[in-house]
Image (cartoon, rainbow, N blue to C red):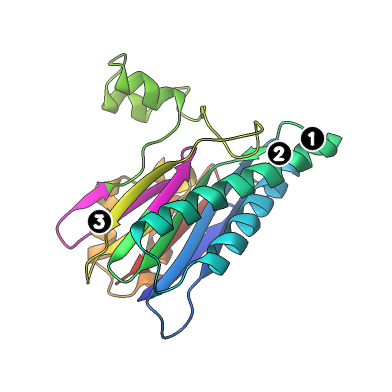
Amino acid sequence: MKCFGITHRGAVRQENQDMFRVFAPEGREILAAVLCDGMGGEKAGSTASTIAADTFMSHAANSLDERSKPADMHMILTEAANYANIKVYDRAFSDFSCMGMGSTLVGLLVNGKKACVVNVGDSRAYLLTKRSVEQITRDHSLVEDMVSRGKITRAEAQNHPKKNIITRAVGVEASVTSDLFDVRFTPGSRIILCSDGLSNLVSGEEMLIVSNNHADVQEVCEALLELALKRGAPDNVTAFIAER
């Protein structure tokens, strides 16, 4: 199994409030990864994403092993997201400068062919094969809710003025509900975790084209970042890829 991640503040923002963490012990078929996109002001956003990513990874890395079954992985992901929520919420409650901060979270656990994803907010996970791309996660956003209710089309959602308003985030309330997804991680496939700084500018179909043009996951991440930067990158851009 191979993996690589990259993050950049983008072409406009002065600070990078995206964070990612990875646990990938050499010689073992297990992996834990998490990507968080902070919100809540100049310093609070990066504080929220750092606390969320570190707390999530601390629990996930200590809990995952080769004996983990999908049900175990669901529990690990749910608990890790809950712990991250508590830590961010407690910091926001106790520190006036961090009041109202929060973070998106998309996390991944892999044990051989078994993979599970958790998400809160609008950071995404995609599954790429040689021939297809599938968005694994569903955004917790105002625009996604409007699409699901038939108020707007998927095409209209792409450039909707309220597309960045999320309806669920880590640390905003005392508890949070996360979504879980099982993924069949077959040899040759890739899972991408990314912040909306990438997915707002690069479609899933374009990610597939870039992936098929590069044999190495580091090259894929670097090419995706370059594409986002060429398109103006108004937000922080982060991508992580795991490959079997």
Q: Is residue 127 magenta?
A: yes
**Which mark is first along the chain, 3 or 1?**
1
Which numbered circle lies on residue 93? Answer: 1
Q: How far across and down, in percent of the image, does residue 135 sit?
A: 30, 45
> Is 153 placed above or below 91 here?
above
Q: Nearer the viewer, residue 102 or 155?
A: 102
**Which mark is first along the chain, 2 or 3?**
2
Helix, strand or loop status at disc 3: helix
Q: How far across and down, in percent of the image, does residue 61 sit?
A: 54, 67
| Segment tinted magenta in the rendering | 117-134
Q: Are marks 2 and 1 in contact (CB under 8 Å)?
A: yes
- What's the distance in space between the residues labelled 3 and 2, CA to CA? 37 Å
Q: Quadrant of the C terminus?
A: bottom left
Which residue, as the protein is rendered here, is positioned at the far left?
131
Q: Is residue 66 left or right of residue 100?
A: left
- Residue 11 seen anywhere in this rendered image of the structure: no
Would you name the residue on which mark 3 appears? Answer: 208
SS assignment for the magenta stretch, majority: strand
Residue at image position (84%, 38%) is 94
- What's the distance in space between the residues labelled 1 and 3, CA to CA? 42 Å
